[in-house]
Image: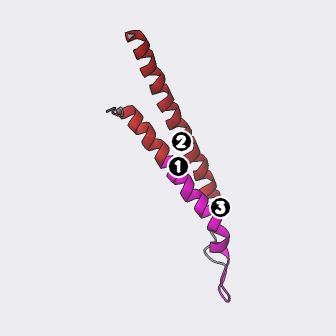
Amino acid sequence: MSTISPVAGNALLGIQRGMDGLRENAAEIASADRLNRPSAGEPASGVRDLAEPLVESRQNARQVEASAKVLEAENRAIGSLLDVKA
């Protein structure tokens, strides 16, 4: 049975949270047209700005990239340790 190191666990959690954020951003962007369209007889108030979910999607993508790099660096470090012990 193998265990996940705390570093790998944190990296995987970062990837998961970034992906969850991307899903939320995509859903908000996809539904923006429907949310912004006023019903018959209603004013177009409450128009949502798409800039916020677009910026957040870039932030979430960066989080996924950074977490993946942490995981990659840990894998290289473990590989180096195994090479030294071998």
Disc 3: CA contacts within 10 A as few (<14), some (14-19) or many (>=20): some
Secondary structure mostly seen in the magenta stretch: helix
Locate residue 71 relative to residue 85 in the image: left or right: right
What secondary structure is found at the residue carrying circle 1? Answer: helix
Tell me, yes or no, whether the highlighted magenta stretch contains residue 3. no
Q: Are marks 1 and 2 in contact (CB under 8 Å)?
A: yes
Q: Measured from the top left, where is residue 68 in percent x and y?
A: 52, 35
Residue for point 65% across, 73% down: 34
**What residue did someone put label 3 on?**
50
Give the magenta part as a residue range. 17-43
Residue type beneath disc 3: Leu
**What residue did someone put label 2 on?**
64
Vertical arrangement, residue 7 with respect to residue 45, above or below: above
Q: Which of marks 1 and 3 is nearer the N terminus?
A: 1
Q: Which of marks 1 and 2 is nearer the N terminus?
A: 1
Disc 1: CA contacts within 10 A as few (<14), some (14-19) or many (>=20): some
Numbered disc in front, either 3 or 2:
2
Residue for point 42% across, 21% down: 78
**Residue 19, disc:** 1
Query: Which residue is nearer to you in this view: 48 or 20?
Result: 20
Q: Earlier in the sequence, mark 3 or mark 2?
A: 3
